[in-house]
Image (cartoon, grey):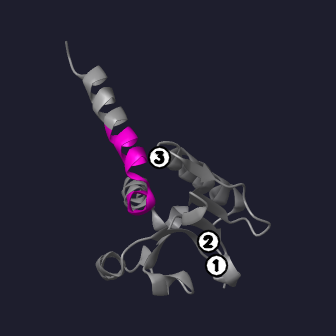
Amino acid sequence: MGTSWTESDAERARQRLVELAAGLPEVTVQPPSEHGHTAVVLGGRRFAWLTVDHHDDGRLALRVGTTRDEQRELVAADPLRFFVPPYDGAQGWVGMLVDPASDPDWDHAAELLEAAWRRRAPKRAQRALDEARIAHEGDAAPS
């Protein structure tokens, strides 16, 4: 299967993923693997990853751990952008195309990442994120 994206597109998607993950406490973004995939990890467990032509599928995709219900809803609502990935799809993961031709919605990607993170993050990390957001909102309030 051919690809409609370039290595530069993959690098831009990787940078967006790093930016989104940076706001989540206790998260590590691993360097790209030899195949170009980038894992987002919490407590030693991957909850999202950017896949680059995974097993020659031609896709540049963000795969995120979701629930099976959420996976079904996303794929049904937008089958041109979302897909059930082989292997981890059976556990409820969803794939989201992030190549430029697919016009990725990075705000939606951020929501999916945070939801996956919250399913795995310890309560103290979730509190830290929530408190930081409240403090930031207070800083942004007009005087």
Does the image show residue 90? Answer: yes
Q: Main secondary structure of the magenta part?
A: helix
Q: Bin the neighbour count of mark 1 within 10 Å (Cα to Cα): few under 14, some 14-19, many 20 and up.
A: some
Q: Position of residue 29 (x, y in %)?
A: 62, 52
Label 1: which residue?
A: 58
Mark 2 and mark 1 in contact? Answer it, CB < 8 Å: yes
Of 79 and 129, the residue lying toward us: 129
Give the alpha-carbon distance from disc 3 to disc 1, as whole Å: 29 Å
Classify residue 118 by image quadrant. Answer: bottom left
Q: Quadrant of the N terminus?
A: bottom right
Label 2: which residue?
A: 4
* 129 falls in the magenta region: yes
Q: Position of residue 139 (x, y in %)?
A: 30, 21
Label 3: which residue?
A: 24
Q: Residue furthest right?
A: 34
Of 57 and 73, the residue lying toward us: 73
Q: Residue furthest left?
A: 143
Does the image show residue 84? Answer: no
Residue at 80%, 66% (x, y): give it.
34
For discs 3 and 1, the disc positioned in front in the rendered view: 3
Side of 141 relative to 91 (left or right): left
For discs 2 and 1, the disc positioned in front in the rendered view: 1
Q: Which residue type carries mark 1?
A: Gly
* 7 falls in the magenta region: no
Residue at 76%, 70% (x, y): give it.
35
Local secondary structure at mark 2:
loop
Q: Quadrant of the C terminus?
A: top left
Label whose residue precedes the other's in the sequence (2 or 3): 2
Local secondary structure at mark 1:
loop
Chain part drawn in magenta: 116-130
Q: Bin the neighbour count of mark 2 within 10 Å (Cα to Cα): few under 14, some 14-19, many 20 and up.
A: few
Residue at 29%, 77% (x, y): give it.
77
